Every structure is written in C-alpha cells, then in structure tokens.
Image: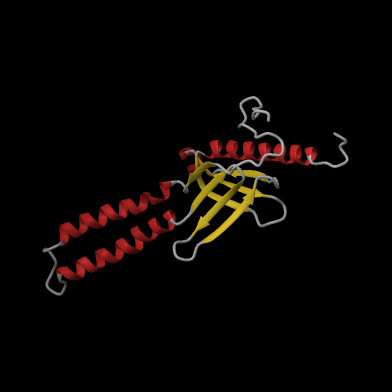
C-alpha cells in the first residue's frame, strides 16, 4: 500500500481506492458583533433599574419596574442570543453542514464532491470586522448561505481547498475503477 500523497501544501490524500474518513475542518457561528446592541441594552436596563428602584412616584411600584426590566431583557437580550446560538456552520472534509433551530432543528448539507461555486459578499461593516456572507451554489439545489462568517477569507480558502481535493479524489477513484483501463 502506498503512503498518502500531498500536493504542495494541500491536505494529505489517501491511497487510491481507500475510503477517506470524514474529519472536522471548522465549526463556527456567525460573527458575534450582532450581539453588541443586546449587551448595550442589558447594561442600560440594569443601570436604569438600579437607579429607579425605590425612587418611583406613588402610582408605580417597584415590582412593576422589575417586571418591565425582565420583559425588556428577555425580548431584547435573551431572544437575540438564542437565535445566534441556534445556528452553527460545520465544514468537514466531505461536506458543509448548516444547523438551525433549538427545538425543531433544520439541517442542510452540501457535498464537496459535487462541486459548487463560492461567492463572498462583504458590506462595509463586515469588512471592518473581517466578516462576510458566503453563498455556495451547485446549480441544482437552492444556494446555501453562510451569514456573517468571521474570518471570511480563511473560510473561503478552506472551502476551495476541500472542493479541489474532493474532486481530485473522486476523479482518481473513477479512473482507477475504470474496467476498460486494461491494467
């Protein structure tokens, strides 16, 4: 059996005919900058509640202030955090997986072997933070969008490398199993 071969810094390739195990390349969430306003609201609500607690006029009571503060925190802090935590992106050596949701999960996958185009879109704020939105399209299924990806250039390179390696392996395996080859 031959040893795995590397092509100028590319990932190691298994010998022809051997199945390649699926390895984790990256797992990440969208950029956390979206939680900035939630953190600012949390600080403001805690400060305002501490300031006004015990200093309210007669028709209002302290429990009303606490209930209003809890409602604002749940609506503007906890809900955005739960939405952010519920979406994960996973890149393996075989596919890209997008998982969304807490209770009822939605999962979409895109195989590297089929090949796909990679489009990167970066707005002004995304460029400032080094983030971007990656759209993966294979021409058959609906495009797969990875929103607000941190270190978007690094993720783009990793995806391009995985597509290239998987297509080389698929082509090599197709050539080695060709019955008309005469070897």
On the picture, is 174 further left or further right than 150? right
Residue located farthest toward the top when viewing the structure as drawn? 8
Residues 100 and 20: in front is 20
Residues 166 and 46: in front is 166
Q: Looking at the picture, how far across and down is residue 29, in whole percent? A: 47, 48
Q: Residue at x 48, y 43 (%)?
A: 125
Q: Is residue 68 above or below residue 87?
A: below
On the picture, is 141 further left or further right than 148? right
The image quadrant where one finds the N terminus is top right
Residue located farthest toward the front when viewing the structure as drawn? 1
Q: In this view, does 58 lie above or below 17?
A: below
Residues 112 and 48: in front is 112
On the picture, is 95 further left or further right than 85? right
Q: Looking at the picture, how far across and down is residue 9, in whole percent? A: 61, 26
| Quarter of image, res 142 | bottom right
Count of numbered badges drawn on the protein? 0
The image quadrant where one finds the C terminus is top right
Residue located farthest toward the bottom when viewing the structure as drawn? 59
Residues 40 and 150: in front is 150
Q: Which residue is drawn at 83% across and 41% down?
A: 178
Is the image coloured rainbow, by chain, by secondary structure, or in one colour?
secondary structure
On the picture, is 122 further left or further right than 36? right
Q: Is residue 175 above or below residue 137?
A: above
Q: Residue at x 66, y 36 (%)?
A: 165
């Amino acid at each position: 059996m031959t040893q795995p071969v590397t092509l100028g810094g590319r990932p190691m390739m298994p010998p022809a005919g051997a199945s390649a195990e699926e390895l984790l390349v990256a797992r990440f969430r969208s950029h956390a900058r979206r939680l900035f306003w939630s953190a600012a609201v949390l600080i403001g609500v805690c400060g305002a509640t501490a300031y006004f607690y015990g200093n309210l006029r007669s028709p209002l009571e302290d429990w009303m202030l606490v209930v209003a503060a809890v409602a604002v925190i749940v609506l503007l802090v906890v809900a955005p955090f739960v939405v952010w935590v519920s979406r994960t992106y996973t890149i393996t050596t075989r596919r890209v997986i997008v998982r969304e949701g807490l209770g009822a999960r939605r999962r979409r996958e895109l195989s590297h072997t089929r090949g796909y185009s990679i489009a990167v879109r970066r707005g002004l704020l995304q460029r400032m933070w080094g983030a971007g939105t990656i759209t993966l399209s294979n021409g058959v299924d609906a495009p797969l969008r990875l929103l607000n990806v941190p270190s978007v250039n690094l993720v783009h390179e990793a995806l391009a490398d995985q597509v290239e390696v998987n297509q080389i392996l698929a082509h090599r395996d197709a050539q080695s199993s060709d019955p008309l080859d005469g070897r």
